[in-house]
Image: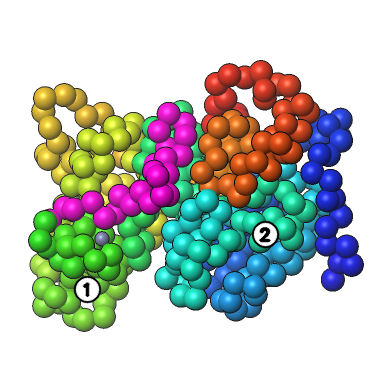
Amino acid sequence: PNPNPNPNPNPNPNPGAMAAAPPLYLGVDLGGTNCRAALVRDTGVIMHVLREGLDGREFGVVVAQIHRLAELVLAEKGLGWGHIRAIGIGGPGLCRNGTIVGAANFPSWHDVPLASAVRGRCGNRPTYLVNDADAAVEAEAWVGAAATHKLQHVVLISLGTGVGTGAIAGGRLLQGSRACIEGGHVLCEPGGRRCPCGQRGCAEAYSSARAIKERYGEKGGEVGVDAREIFRRAKEGEALAAETVQEAIEMIARMCINISRVLDPEAFVFSGGISGLGEPFLERIRARFQELRWTVLPDEQQFLLASVGADSGIIGAAGAARRAIAERRYLPCEVSDAALQTEDVSAEADANPDSKADPNPSPDPN
Ligand SMILES: [Zn+2]
C-alpha cells in the first residue's frame, strides 16, 4: 500500500520536465471477468502490462482495483503519476461522457461515473472512457491495419458474442450524439429474428457467435454446439451448418452495404472471435458484398483483418486518450471539458510546441 496515493496532485506539471520525457499513457481494459492496466508509449507500444481477475463487480471494488493495478504497473517501472499524460479506459457496455450508462456484465451499474472516479484516485490525470469497440478501432487506427494502410475512414466490425462496431471518419472517432452508434443493429431482415436489443432482424441476430449457435439449433442442428464447431462442420460439408454460416455471411454483407451508404468508409476491419476464421471468411463477405452493392458508382472498400489482437483494448483506450489530448478537439468521452481545457491541455500545449504547430495531426505517429 502506498501511503501517498496521489504523489503528483499538481495539475500543471513543470513544462520542461514534460518536454524532456516522451509521454506515457495508462491504458485500462475492463472486461467482464478481468482487468488489465498497461503503460503505453507514445508510439503505441506497450511498455508494461498487468492483468488480474476482478475482485468483484461492485463499482467501488472495481475502481479500487483499477487504482491498485495502475499504481502497481507504475511502481514496477519506478514511475509515478507525473509520467502519465492521460488515462484511457476501455469499458463495457454503453460509455458516455465518462460514465457507464449500463453494461450487461455489471448489472448493478447505472450511470456510474467511472472516468471521474478513476481520475480522482489516479493522480488527477485527464481520464477518458470509450467502449470496447471504439477502443478496438482506435487501436487499429493507431498501430493496426488502418495505420498500415494509411486509412482515415474505417469501420471496425467486432464479431464476437455480439456484433460491435467502431467508426473513425476523417481521422476522428465517431460517437454520435449519445455514444450510441451500433452498426450490429442495422436492420438486415425486417420482421426477422428477435435480437437481444429488442428489434427484429438486426445483423447481430444472425451473425454473432451466440446467434450462429442458436440459429443452428433452430434449423434442426445439434443444440448447444458453438460457432467455431459449426464453422468446422460447414467446412466439412454438413448442410445445416453451411446454411447457418451462409446466413451469417449474408447478414454481415448486408450490414456492410448499409454502413457503406451512410459512412462511406475506405475499409472494414474485422476483429473478434469469428474473424479468426481469416481470409477465406473475409473473401466470402467481400464476394457477397460485391453482388449486393449498387452499380451506379464504384465501391472500393477494403475488407481487412484487425492486426492488433488481444491488446487492442488497452492500446486503443490509451490511443483514444492520446488523440483527445493531442488534437484538442474530440472531447465527448472525457470527464470534464473545463478541467481539461484550463489545466492539462494548456500545460501540454506549452510544453510541446511541435504538437501545437501541426494543424493536421496524423493518427499514425510513425
Ligand atoms: Zn439488435
Please give the residue where the numbered disc 1 appears in the rendered image. 214
- Residue sitting at x 14%, y 75%: 218
Percent of width and height locating residue 300:
26, 29
- Residue sitting at x 64%, y 73%: 60
Label 2: how many residues lie within 10 Å, few (<14), some (14-19) or many (20+)? many
Mark 2 or mark 1: whose residue is earlier in sequence? 2
Please give the residue where the numbered disc 2 appears in the rendered image. 118
* Residue sitting farthest toward the bottom: 223
Q: Is residue 181 magenta?
A: yes
Q: Main secondary structure of the magenta part?
A: loop
Percent of width and height locating residue 141:
49, 38
Percent of width and height locating residue 66:
67, 65
The reply to whether residue 205 is visible in this rendering is yes
Q: Secondary structure at mark 1?
A: helix
* Residue sitting farthest toward the right: 3
Residue 330 tag number = none
Q: Nearer the viewer, residue 16 or 51?
A: 16
The reply to whether residue 276 is visible in this rendering is no
Q: Nearer the viewer, residue 64 or 41?
A: 64
Q: Nearer the viewer, residue 284 or 166?
A: 166
Contact check, label 2 and label 1, Cβ < 8 Å: no
Colouring scheme, one of rainbow, by chain, secondary structure, one colour: rainbow
Report the amino acid beneath label 2.
Val
Report the amino acid beneath label 1.
Glu
| Residue 2 picture quarter | bottom right
User: Which region shows up in magenta?
Assistant: 167-189
Q: In the rendered view, does 297 fall on the left or right side of 168?
A: left
> Which tag is nearer the camera, tag 2 or tag 1?
2
